[in-house]
Image (cartoon, rainbow, N blue to C red):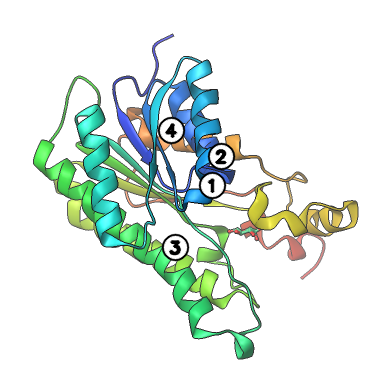
């Protein structure tokens, strides 16, 4: 069967673990060259391991160290990618983190750290990707669009989250960053959308699934009654990155087992 992303190159930020790693594997499965980005030296091996797995399945890619909140490092990652593969077709703005604290105890460092990686990182990477898409234009042999950006948001772009105000603010910010640039560049045939994952089993939310008690508590928030896996997001990313979704632009796609359906109202209200 023809692969949907053959001869396209995708940068996946924060793909040495979690959802990013799942998305990188999924895009590689569909033929994309993948750039496995990791933020700091001490997780280099994790990125190398993901790439080795992708290569053992016949995929192609490189690893690239870059802190997405640093302008010069973002530029260097794009330069390295273009040098290696010629251009960039797909950006997955995935890098993100949590530094949770009750709001009255939240430090400015905790606030700034989360906003700089989750929101400023998506600004810097999107800007670089759009510059490259505008320079290159459409490559009709690979896609109807001149480029695709997928922002990893969260159900918390709409669900308020006590004790996580910095994180929820960053995701709410991503929603209007994504929609504003989708509106700005649609006429250039650049498509920009978000995936809003619910609870996906990854290191970021380990405390919510590592014990049976925690998991059963979590499942009260998920009508579909299972925790998500990174490949659930990977499959959505393939669709949004491919021409199968060519008419989809500026959308927030919730992949959450129904977490945003107000499950507390199932039996009363
Ligand atoms: C958070 C996870 C959380 C999920 C659902 C995600 O955006 O990073 O920690 O489990 O939202 O609340």
Q: Are marks 2 and 1 in contact (CB under 8 Å)?
A: yes
Q: Are marks 4 and 2 in contact (CB under 8 Å)?
A: no
Mark 1 and ligand 1: say if the CB distance to the nearest ligand atom is below 8 Å. Answer: no
The residue at which mark 4 appears reads as: 239
Label located before the other in sequence (4 or 3): 3
Residue at the farthest bottom position: 104
Left or right: residue 217 compared with residue 150:
right
Label located before the other in sequence (3 or 1): 1
Quarter-of-image position of residue 17 = top right
Provide the secondary structure element on which disc 1 rests: helix
Provide the secondary structure element on which disc 3 rests: helix
Q: CA distance from mark 3 to mark 2?
A: 21 Å
Estimate the x, y position of residue 181 in percent, counting from the top left.
25, 58
The residue at which mark 2 appears reads as: 46
The residue at which mark 1 appears reads as: 43
**Residue at (25%, 28%) from the top-left corner?**
85
Quarter-of-image position of residue 243 = top left
Q: CA distance from mark 3 to mark 1?
A: 18 Å
Label located before the other in sequence (4 or 2): 2
Residue at the farthest top position: 1
The residue at which mark 3 appears reads as: 118
* Label 4 neighbour load within 10 Å: few <14, some 14-19, many 20+: some
Estimate the x, y position of residue 16 in percent, counting from the top left.
52, 42
Label located before the other in sequence (3 or 2): 2
Q: CA distance from mark 4 to mark 2?
A: 26 Å
Provide the secondary structure element on which disc 2 rests: helix
Q: CA distance from mark 2 to mark 1?
A: 5 Å
């Amino acid at each position: 069967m023809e692969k949907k992303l053959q001869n396209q190159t995708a940068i996946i930020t924060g793909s040495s673990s979690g959802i990013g790693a799942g998305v990188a594997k999924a895009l590689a499965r569909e033929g994309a060259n993948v750039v496995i980005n990791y933020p700091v030296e001490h997780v280099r091996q994790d990125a190398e391991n993901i790439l080795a797995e992708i290569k053992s399945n016949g995929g192609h890619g490189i690893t690239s160290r870059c802190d997405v909140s640093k302008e010069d490092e973002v530029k260097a990652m794009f330069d390295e990618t273009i040098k290696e593969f010629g251009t960039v077709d797909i950006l997955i703005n995935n890098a993100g983190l949590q530094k949770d604290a009750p709001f009255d105890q939240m430090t400015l460092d905790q606030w700034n750290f989360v906003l700089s990686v989750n929101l400023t990182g998506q600004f810097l990477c999107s800007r670089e990707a759009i510059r490259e898409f505008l320079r290159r234009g459409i490559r009709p042999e690979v896609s109807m669009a001149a480029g695709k950006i997928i922002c990893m948001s969260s159900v918390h772009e709409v669900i308020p989250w006590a004790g996580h105000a910095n994180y929820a603010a960053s995701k709410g910010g991503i929603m209007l960053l994504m929609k504003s640039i989708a509106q700005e560049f649609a006429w250039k045939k650049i498509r920009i959308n978000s995936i809003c994952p619910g609870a996906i089993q990854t290191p970021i939310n380990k405390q919510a699934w590592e014990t049976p008690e925690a998991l059963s508590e979590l499942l009260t928030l998920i009508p579909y009654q299972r925790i998500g896996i990174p490949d659930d997001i990977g499959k959505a990313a393939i669709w949004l990155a491919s021409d199968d979704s060519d008419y989809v632009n500026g959308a927030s796609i919730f992949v959450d087992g129904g977490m945003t359906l107000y499950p507390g109202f199932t039996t009363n209200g």
